[in-house]
Amino acid sequence: MSGIGGLLSNDIGIDLGTANTLVYVKDSGVVISEPSVVAVYNNSKKVVAVGEKAKRMLGKTPANITAVRPMKVGVIADFEITEVMLRSFIERASKQWKFVAPRVVIAVPSGITEVERRAVQESAIHAGARSVCLKDEPLMAAIGVGLPVEEPTASMIVDIGGGTTEIAIISLGNIVFTRSVRIGGDKFDDDIIQYMKRAYNLIIGERTAEEIKINIGSAFELDNELTWEVKGRDSVAGLPKTLYVTSQEIREALGESLKAITDVIREALEQCPPELSADLVTRGIVLAGGGSLLRNINLRISDVTGLPCFVADDPLRAVVNGTGAVLQNYEFWTKENS
């Protein structure tokens, strides 16, 4: 029956991220890439919008509507809203296949608890999945960027997502050593918000902080430092205010969070078995996730570790592409390597 089910349904891989959710349909590739945001009416809890439409409402909704991000630091913070979001994405991804519910592979942070894992599974089942297989994000990212994870040599992946940074050393198809720190793109945004408030008494929102991060954020010195116009509200006068900030200032704002990430990478390298450490000297470290797009973050990690560090070709889709690879060889990855 499972073989017949596979013919009548499209299996789905999901990168259920704090900032963005990506959905991969077997034999079709990535079909959905949208923010992990849901807008609902406060009284009835009826859904107003999901994904990109809902994100545009953040901070701008009337009193009767709330736009929420149901994932916090890589795990479910709001069970009901996550289920609504998953149902919407699963229905959209499997709309051409109504005969049998899809099997779903979901990438989750390696550091989450059993309770949190069950919450993800139950949300997906309630949202319409036939069965759910959870796989560790760093392994999925490593597979997704094309690292030779099944070989008897070390591969090191650092996946910097919206809520967590996952560090893993992988050999022979499994994680040898992993560490997770609940710092990612969202924490970078919050660092910028706090810096603007502290340095300029300027209150800005999440979307403005993200714009600053994307346009002038950096982790290491730039050849040509950048400047950006920031609009917000003066916390003293209470009036709109415009000022300019530099990439040096934003780098200072991100300093503590970046140090926390590099400290965990150093810890992982210190705990790595000697034979695998030798492999990493030549193979280096590969970065994935949206946070790896922060300018020169690979240079900062190389400076701290002394190892070569590279950003993957398609870092935003690394994890979901890994779930796609699992779907292509579902029995192997869900039984032998589970």
Image (spheres, rainbow, N blue to C red):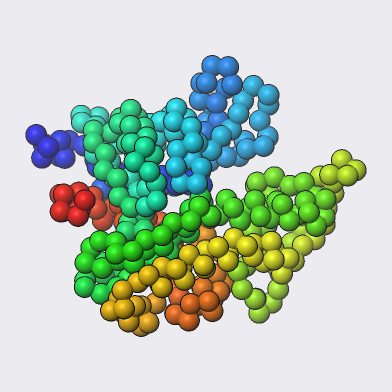
> Going 19% across and 55% down the picture, which residue do you hit?
337
Vertical arrangement, residue 38 with respect to residue 34, above or below: above
Q: How many marks?
A: 0
Compared with 166, 171 (above or below) is below
| Quadrant position of residue 60 | top right
| Relative depth, front residue between 263 and 150 | 263
In the image: residue 231, left or right of residue 156: right
From the top left corner, tell me how far across and down residue 158 is, in percent: 43, 64
Asked if 236 appears above or below 44 in the picture, the reply is below
The structure residue drawn at horizontal position 84% and vertical position 44%, both measured from the top left corner, is 235
Considering every residue shown, the one lying at the far right of the view is 237
Splitting the image into 4 quarters, where does residue 273 fall? bottom left
Residue at 57%, 22% in the rendered image: 41
Image quarter of the N terminus: top left
Q: Is residue 285 left or right of residue 140?
A: right
Q: Is residue 238 left or right of residue 147?
A: right
Residue 25, placed above or below residue 251 = above
Residue 21 spot, x, y in % from top left: 44, 45
Quarter-wise, where is residue 152 in the image? bottom left
In the picture as drawn, the residue positioned furthest to the top comes out as 44
Q: Position of residue 299 (x, y in %)?
A: 54, 76
Q: Position of residue 278 (x, y in %)?
A: 32, 82
* Residue 26 visible from this viewpoint: yes
98 vs 297, nearest the viewer: 297
Which residue reaches farthest front?
271
Residue 150 in view in this figure: no
Residue at 69%, 45% (x, y): give it: 205
